[in-house]
Image (spheres, grey):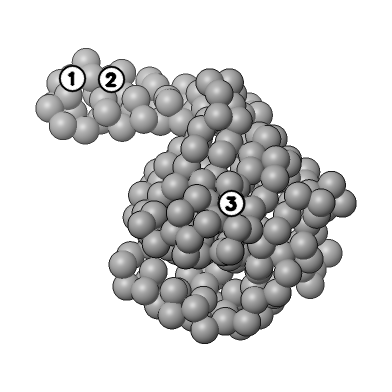
């Protein structure tokens, strides 16, 4: 399940982030790559724990905590501190799968990477290339979103970033451990939640039968969550 989440950040937050990122000191992106992905990875990255990365990462996590679409789609349990990368001058990232387990820097905690997320800080017209290509059951999905928007997809997916031939692609990327590790179950919960919201809103909300259906479906949702959630 690939979910586009628009306007995670406001225009003001994007502008603030871009100012800090454009002035930041970048290092070789291989520092956070696993053994296999390091062979395919060619980009620049902010050092983990740098003041800019921490400030912007906190901003992103706070914004996600207020985003209903993200919360419904991800059912997040833990969020890895956001990282930041930059592609320019032909840089790319070959096809790979993200590491299954990530150690949270500076802590004894680890998270299982159920979902991968990429949040864009550069608009599509600022650079050529740089599409995030994610392989799923329907083929290869090519993603290049406006600044402030985010794509959420299963971390089990093969994916790559095409070469950036003009300008610079600047993004935040990170992983999430969901309360529901199985992507199919998580997708069912998302669809059920959307259906409940449709029934509960608009003109249907005034219909007694619709209200009863919304209550019943909400009960099904929470009982499934009770069965499937891992805490």
Residue 39 rendering spot, x and y as whole percentages: 81, 51
Residue 205, x across and y down, in percent: 18, 28
CB under 8 Å between discs 1 and 2: yes
Q: Residue at x 40, y 30 (%)?
A: 193
From what the image shows, is residue 138 above or below residue 87? above
Which numbered marker is on residue 163? 3
Question: Which element carries disc 3, helix, strand or loop?
Answer: loop
For residue 127, which quarter of the picture?
A: bottom left
Could you tell me if residue 178 is visible in this image? no
Q: Secondary structure at mark 2?
A: helix
Q: CA distance from mark 3 to mark 1?
A: 55 Å
Q: Quadrant of residue 49?
A: bottom right
Q: Is residue 44 visible?
A: yes
Compare marks 2 and 3 and give the one earlier in the sequence: 3
Left or right of 131? Residue 147 is: left
Percent coordinates x, y for residue 170 in the rendering? 51, 64
Asked if residue 52 lies left or right of residue 199, the reply is: right
Image side of residue 206 versus residue 49, left or right = left
Mark 2–mark 3 CB contact (< 8 Å): no
Label drawn at residue 142 = none
Q: Residue at x 47, y 65 (%)?
A: 167
**What mark, if any, has residue 208 been given in the picture?**
1
Per the image, the residue denoted by label 2 is: 212
Q: CA distance from mark 2 to mark 3?
A: 53 Å
Determine which quarter of the picture holds residue 82. Answer: bottom right
In this orientation, which residue lies closer to the viewer: 41 or 63? 41
């Amino acid at each position: 399940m690939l979910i586009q989440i628009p306007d995670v950040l406001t225009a003001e937050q994007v502008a603030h982030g871009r100012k800090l990122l454009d002035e930041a000191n970048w290092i070789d992106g291989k520092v956070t790559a696993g053994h296999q992905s390091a062979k395919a990875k060619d980009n620049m990255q902010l050092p983990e724990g740098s003041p800019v990365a921490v400030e912007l990462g906190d901003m992103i996590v706070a914004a996600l905590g207020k985003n209903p679409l993200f919360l419904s789609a991800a059912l997040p349990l833990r969020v890895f501190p956001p990282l930041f990368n930059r592609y320019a001058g032909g840089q790319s990232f070959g096809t790979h799968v993200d590491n299954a387990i990530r150690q949270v820097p500076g802590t004894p905690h680890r998270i299982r990477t159920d979902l991968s997320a990429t949040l864009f800080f550069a608009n599509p017209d600022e650079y050529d290339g740089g599409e995030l290509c994610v392989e799923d059951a329907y083929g290869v999905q090519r993603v290049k979103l406006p600044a402030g928007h985010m794509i959420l997809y299963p971390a089990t997916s093969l994916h790559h970033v095409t070469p950036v031939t003009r300008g610079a692609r600047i993004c935040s990327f990170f992983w999430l451990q969901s309360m529901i590790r199985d992507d199919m179950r998580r997708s069912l919960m998302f669809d059920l939640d959307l259906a409940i919201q449709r029934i509960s809103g608009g003109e249907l909300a005034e219909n007694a039968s619709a209200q009863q259906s919304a209550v019943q479906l909400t009960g099904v949702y929470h009982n499934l969550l009770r069965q499937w959630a891992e805490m």
